[in-house]
Image (cartoon, rainbow, N blue to C red):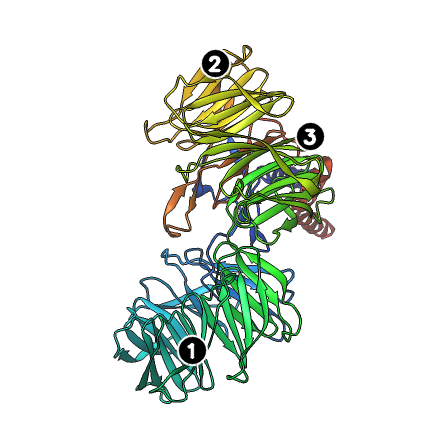
Amino acid sequence: MIKKQRFIMNLVFIIIIFIQLFSFSNSSSGLLISEPVNGLQTNSVDESLIETDICSELAQWDNIYGEPNDIFVQETLMSKIAYIALGYAGLVMYDISNPTNPKFLGQYVDQEGDGIDEVIVIGKFAFVVGGAYGLKVIDLSSPKNPKFILDYSEVEYLSNIEVHGDYIFGSQWWEFLQVIDISNPKNPHLVNSYTKIHESAISKIRINNNLLYLVGSQGIEILDISNPQKPLYETFWEFDVDVYSFDIYGLTAIISDNSDVLFYNIGNPSNITLITRYSDIRCHSKCILVDENYVFSFGYPGFICFDIENPNSIVKVNEFIREAGYVSYGLKHDEFIYLYDLYMGIEIVYIGDLTITPLSAGKIITNGYTLDTIVQGNLAYVSNFWGGLDILDIDNPTNPKLISRYTGSFSFFSSMYLENSKLYLANYATNTLEILDVSDPTAPKRISSFYNVLNIFWLESEMIVKEDIAFILIINDLYPILDGAIHIVNCTNPANVSIIYSLNNHNATLTDFYLVENHLFLATSTGLLIYEINNNYSLTFISEYSEISSSIAGVFVENNTVYLAAKDYGLIILDVSDIENPNLIRSYDTDHNSGYEFGGYDVFVENNIIYLADYSDGLLVFDGTNIQNPFIIGRYKRFDYHPLYGYNMLQTVLFKDVFVSNYVVYLSSGYSGLLIVHHDDLPTHWMSTQNIIIISITTTVPFLFGGLIAFIILRIRKRR
């Protein structure tokens, strides 16, 4: 009997150890639990979105992408939550109790692929509209896990929703006013439909006391909604300008004509008179908001505030105007203004009592579009074209962690380069070259900003920096009427940055380049150009390779070998040991649809392993030990939902940039953020002793606990 018990116990512990080892092997493959950080998520791997051959996705660092269409702020005793409508990206929730550090709570994405353009939150329910559907109701009892309740589709194409008591008023087809009873959020029902009398299409709805204003470009139709179920026509105000936005204070109507702010006396509706007009070319008025006796006029760079307590003496009291931006609207809540910036997301501005200069308190980045990644040591620098710069701790690449984020005044970073402790950023929005001190990655600091009147940073670019000399390639494929160029910029003195040489190319689109010692290899739409870099940093043409009818999108050079990513072909390998006569070593055709540029887009080489970002096949991994005969050893292809086409339509992810460090591949993937991938048969470096111990403990403890219980049971039975 004793031997049998010992046998059973040994068997239990063997099973425990086996399960623990199996769990450990799964942990190293990168299966993660969702860990949202300020809108960024290291997602669990969704195998349905991946096609792989001996490759594993370790993690995804994804900035939720969506243009902010609307925001609703709800404050409770315990928190303050912002609900942001992001079109096809759905509805996202942030805790903004501390506006300097908004915390991501959750996201709702419509399962039918519908977008969300407007949101109103009442209690624990969100009422949303957008596109062709009617009014949808979402349960927000748990913001981390919002749940769809119903789609009230009796009224389709609903927009411009406003709430008044137990009723939602919204326009349909820009012609009808619909009144919906929401006293029971789980059973909304239509109570009235009002047909607009005047021809002007409804662009906005405003409610003030018991009057409802139907705003149209030709004027404003006013209804009495004392009885919400039976709106009654009151009058129509006609103005001498097109009405883009409207609000009201007492007997003063405030109107934006898409440029200026106009103040009208409406005391006599039959004789509306202009009080004054305000114009500011820095901030053309796009929309108007009235809060108490203050008027906020929102324009692309920010807002201007007026005091209209005395309508006969309207005073400008403050402004918040940035270097650049695309503000479409704003919301005031308590002492903060929430700016909807179509390119960035939400900027939270502290205004206090308006006696101080408004200050930016925080940002909720919703428009991440990852273009570039640099890895050095255990840090990754991720450039988001709309979302700023993220610095990540990637000591364990299966679990990247945000260290800091730099957004500057406005952040459209199209390219970057790290040299020593300086990070160089090309800012598309402000047309500047920004130089950051990143010696302390937790607190990057701008030490210089170089603006150029020639708009050399205005287009998408690539950049390499050597000994404080920046080589900047301007890519002109989106604007073919403009010349692509290489600009060489002297940054040795950050206080006096200057261009020392420029090379324009009128014959081809410039796409990528690479520097090796005193040679520059330039990829173009017609082939490869090779230049010598002279002592004064001027460029002298040496040779070219154009014996293939394909645009070259990416170039990498190592040991007298050039690797080219060809859009309409795939991989091309050249021997440049004789720099004046580049020769073809090998080509590899990956484009399955010749003529459609479904081939290579970027290339990187590390330890004789070639990584090709390919439109048709995703990431292709080649063994290039024998350069005469490289062969594919792995493949990784990713699919994702494209925010511009809806979340019910999967698209192939095109990898914008490839960076490899210690066999870990970092793929800058546009809307899909940063994807981190590893070839299963290549070495790993991140499974340090410390990580192994942590994973072993976390995966073993539950089974040891189970084994202990089994041991106790056996001991009790033995005593009996």
The residue identified by callout 2 is: 629
As rendered, which of 238 and 143 lies closer to the eye? 238
Q: Is residue 390 above or below residue 606?
A: below
First along the sequence among labels 2 and 3: 3
Dot 2 crowding, Cα within 10 Å, few <14, some 14–19, many 20+: few
Query: Of the residues shown, which amino acid type is indicated by label 2?
Result: Asn
Q: Position of residue 269 (x, y in %)?
A: 36, 87
Q: Position of residue 449 (x, y in %)?
A: 64, 46
First along the sequence among labels 3 and 1: 1
Marks 2 and 3, how far apart at CA: 37 Å
**Location of residue 8 by image quarter:** top right
As rendered, which of 183 and 552 lies closer to the eye? 552
Q: Is residue 130 above or below residue 429?
A: below
Residue in the picture at 62% in, 27% down:
683
Residue in the picture at 57% in, 43% down:
452
Q: Is residue 28 above or below residue 446?
A: above
As rendered, which of 665 and 584 lies closer to the eye? 584
Dot 3 crowding, Cα within 10 Å, few <14, some 14–19, many 20+: few
Kind of element beneath mark 3: loop
Marks 2 and 1, how far apart at CA: 68 Å
Kind of element beneath mark 2: loop
As rendered, which of 444 and 585 lies closer to the eye? 444
**The N terminus lies in which quarter of the figure?**
top right
Mark 3 touching mark 1, by CB under 8 A? no
The residue identified by callout 3 is: 467
Question: Which is in the foreground here, disc 2 or disc 3?
Answer: 3
The residue identified by callout 1 is: 163
First along the sequence among labels 2 and 1: 1
